[in-house]
Amino acid sequence: MQLVSGTQYEIRLKKVCAQSFASRRRKKNILIMLSSENLLPSVLILLILCLRLGASGGILVGWNSSIFRGQVLNKKQFGITLSFTSVHNMDTWRLTTVYGPCAEPDRSEFINWFRGHLITDSDNWLFLGDFNFYRSLQNRNKPGGNLSDTLIFNDAIGHLGLIELQLKGRAFTWSNMQQDPLLEQLDWFFTSPNWTLDYPNTEVLPMAKITSDHIPCKVAIGTNIPRSNIFRFENFWVEHAGFLDTVQNQWTISQQQSSASRTISSKLKALRSALKTWSRGLSNLSLLIANCNKVILFLDALEDRRFLYNPELNLRIMIKKISLLLCCIIRMSTGETDIQ
């Protein structure tokens, strides 16, 4: 399970994920969510660290305590480093999530802090977030930029020996949200050399940009967590036409068993299978949200390559509103409320 700006997403099995979300509104936040499959939002333990006030907000980190034990190792106004230990196999790795400042002298202090990390040959370390630097002048869609900043940033990366995780399918991660937008890649993902040996299938995937001017990104790391085959009965099923007919038709099918208890058990198993098949034809709000996000993601990727025409811009605005409305419907139907 992942949360991005109050929106719920389902992730596939055999993945441990981290997401970075930044918003350039009056308060800026970076959200990192570490979690696993088949877990409900109610069991997520959130650690909120408010580092700065005013125009620039802080960093929020959350993880599932039944999967990881987390410990804060270092905390600055522009970054947090945590150590995570798996409760399953006791593997340990580190996460540093950053929000790089835009102006001096904080900018130089941030680079010195970033460059000063000590990474051993055996460390599994993941660095990610909004660095507010780009590595090349080609990391923006318009002429200009600060060549000196690119040299400083690349020197720090080389000094640490970090390996970049390429963002798949997108050239830029930030937009100024204008009709003729300035696009830049300001969000970056790096690992220590040993990480590539222990977790060679790590990849960074873009997600739909619904409310933020930054692209939410998902870091997927392959694991061997088994999938549990659990049947979940949804309360809203009883309100749908066809539910009672499905139950009645399945329950009246004769089950030849040696005892009454075996007959009941057999009927329940058959009914479970029938309800699973029947429920696939119901309206699926999560699927509608996923389809909306695909359209937004496609239009964002298209904007990387050319200007969007007015109908395309209006379509993106409309789809974003629809997606947010569907998310509100899901929250109301499940009894969830926004955290104030």
Image (cartoon, rainbow, N blue to C red):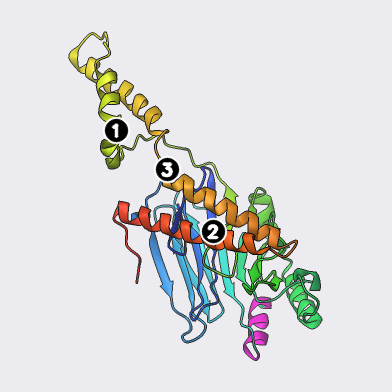
Residue 314 covered by magenta stretch = no
What's the residue at 55%, 45% (across, down)? 223
| Label 3, label 2: how far apart the Cα atoms are | 26 Å
Q: In which quarter of the image is residue 264?
A: top left
Q: Residue furthest front?
A: 311
Earlier in the chain: of badge 1 and badge 2, it is 2
**Disc 2: which residue:** 18
| Label 1, label 3: how far apart the Cα atoms are | 15 Å
**Disc 1: which residue:** 241
Quadrant assignment for the C terminus: bottom left
In the image, residue 332 sits, relative to residue 158, either above or below, namely above
Q: Which residue lies furthest to the left in this view?
A: 260
Looking at the rendered structure, the kind of residue marked 3 is Asn
How would you rate the neighbour count of disc 3 (Cα within 10 Å): few for under 14, some for 14-19, many for 20 or more? few
SS assignment for the magenta stretch, majority: helix
SS under mark 3: loop
Residue 107 covered by magenta stretch = yes
On the image, the x and y values in percent for residue 58 come to 49, 78
SS under mark 2: strand
SS under mark 1: loop
Q: In this view, does 54 lie to the left or right of 269?
A: right
Total count of labels: 3
Looking at the rendered structure, the kind of residue marked 1 is Ala
Q: Nearer the viewer, mark 1 or mark 2?
A: 1
**Disc 3: which residue:** 284
| Label 1, label 2: how far apart the Cα atoms are | 40 Å
Q: Are marks 1 and 2 in contact (CB under 8 Å)?
A: no
On the image, the x and y values in percent for residue 322 come to 47, 57
Q: Nearer the viewer, mark 3 or mark 2?
A: 3
Q: Give the range drawn in magenta.
A: 104-115
Judging depth in this view, the residue of 170 and 91 nearest the camera is 170
